Amino acid sequence: MNNRPTIRDVAKAAGVSVTTVSHALNGKGRVDPETRALVGQVVRQLGYRANRHAQVLRSGRTGALALLLPVQADVGSNEALSLDFYMRLASAAAAAAFAGEQALMLLPPAVVSTGLDGLGVDGGIVVDPSPLDSRVELLARHGLPVVTIERDLGRLDDPWYVTGQTDVSTRQLLDHLRAQGARRICLLAPQADWGWITETLRAYDQWIAGHGAPRLVVPVAMQDGEESAFAATRQLLAAPDPPDAIFVVASRFIHGVQRAAKAAARRVPGELLIAAGVDSVHAREGDPPVTAIDLHPERQAEAAVEMLLARLKGDPPAGPLYVPATLRLRASTGAR
């Protein structure tokens, strides 16, 4: 015999209608705060839990959210899945989804070409979009709401995104390098069109122009990032007029840059300052530890899940949401 309390039991104990209980639990309709609090109290006392299957049938919702990382089709050779930034982000997104009694599904990159058939999700979070990102387009084609972490620069009117304000943190890091004596700051920029990379480059150019400093931008391939960064940095340091600071935009470049500095016998920070645009285990455990911008991926993920759930409820846009970054000063730039 099933003694599990039903929504009717909750309604009877609270002295309200079944509809009122439903609205109070789902955030729908007009329910005054006192009644909503009373329903919540009765739900806890009785140990009531909604029937998920029945909810799906009534609402058409699956109770699952999708997370789409910037992973290439060849997952076996892709470094994104091993980067601690994305793993921290994915873990926090799962925790936030679970807190809202939602499942979180990490979708493979192949869905862009194969579609979402058989994958029941209510909406998705797209991380590091390119302009007019195909992952955003895929979800939109299925009529599913989307939230992006960082801005899709091809959809400038879309307010549904969470960002770390790349322009602000980039200028802050460049100001720090200049204060530490750097005058020839090289930007090691990933060869990708993701929005935050474009915004980093734009902020760098504006800062360089404002300070009358030389523009030193070196594109580096994202694949085999460490080796690509090693080769690029060795060439930079062998030039007649090498940089005195390197701004490593992507965390996967950090080890390669540090290896190249050692191979060229450049003391860090005595002769060369190194800083990164994304904090990571590579930065924290570098030799020496590397000054980096902490984008707080956990906070970004939590904000994105909350925004997506709000969008699913039909709430008006509350975005964009800004998660302020923190500059972590470490030994690579002479910080104590």
Image (cartoon, rainbow, N blue to C red):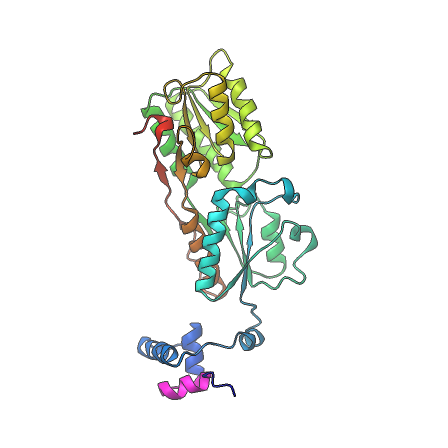
Question: Residue 165 lies in what quarter of the image?
Answer: top left
Q: Residue at x 56, y 69 (%)?
A: 61
The answer to which image quadrant residue 73 occupies is top right
In this view, the residue in front, 167 or 335, is 335
Which residue shows up at 59% across the image and 33% down it?
A: 224
Q: Is residue 313 left or right of residue 39?
A: right
Q: Is residue 9 magenta?
A: yes
| Magenta span: chief secondary structure | helix
Residue 316 drawn above or below residue 30: above
Which residue is at the front of the view, 259 or 64? 259
Residue 263: x and y in percent read 50, 18
Which residue is rendered at x = 43% and y = 63% of the image?
99
Front-most of residues 97 and 28: 97
**Residue 17 visible to the viewer:** no
Residue 79 counted in the magenta span: no
Q: Residue furthest right?
A: 114
Magenta segment = 6-18
Quadrant position of the C terminus in the picture: top left
Camera-side residue of 251 and 62:
251
The image position of residue 150, as x and y in percent, is 48, 46
Q: Is residue 207 above or below residue 167?
A: above
Determine the residue located farthest toward the front in the rendered image.
1
The percent position of residue 197, horizontal first and vertical second, equals 50, 37
Does residue 103 show up?
yes
Residue 218 location (% of width, % of height): 53, 25
Numbered disc total: 0
Q: Residue at x 46, y 48 (%)?
A: 88
